[in-house]
Amino acid sequence: MPTISMVGGMLTRPLRQLFRPLAISEVGMSAQQEFMETISANIANAGTTRTAEGGAYRRQVAVIHGDAASGAVSAQVVADASPGRLVYDPGHPDADANGYVHMPNVDTSTELVDLMIARRMHEANATAFQAAKAMLRRAIDI
């Protein structure tokens, strides 16, 4: 009969503990995927001066929340409150009475750097996942 242990207030079997590194890497890859999708939306809308809600596009930021007790991780996308820049273009259809257009608060250089970081972190989690998977395969062979 397998032994049962108590971890974090939950009963677990030793075999499930072997798969924990895979689950940790999977959560990391999911979080980075959320970052990459949010950043991609920001880059795609960097020039959008009119949205369905009215006004210029607002930069979105993915925020990851983790519960230390349960290990659950959730992502939330929130709008960045920083102001966008004003561009003088009286011929633009979205120009105000003074000829200024409210542009999105998206800096594509910052977004591209953030995208590269998120991509590298996703790759690191994928590498850790592959290493853990290889160790489990070797453990099965023993």
Image: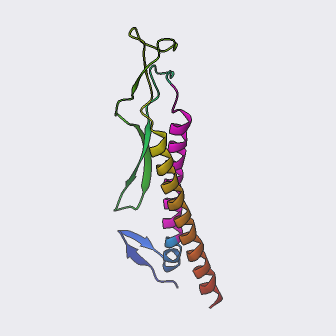
Give whichever of 46, 142 is nearer the camera.
46
Stretch in magenta: 22-48
- In the shown orientation, is residue 120 left or right of residue 8? right
**Magenta run includes residue 24:** yes
Give whichever of 5, 51 is nearer the camera.
51
Give whichever of 6, 63 is nearer the camera.
63
Residue in view at x 50 percent, y 38 percent? 42
Residue in view at x 35 percent, y 30 percent? 83
| Residue 59 percent location from the top left of the image | 44, 35
* Quadrant assignment for the C terminus: bottom right
Residue in view at x 40 percent, y 8 percent? 97
- In the shown orientation, is residue 33 left or right of residue 97? right
**Magenta run includes residue 72:** no
| Residue 61 percent location from the top left of the image | 42, 42
- 60 is higher (above) or lower (below) than 5: above
- 107 is higher (above) or lower (below) than 86: below
* Res 127 quadrant in image: bottom right
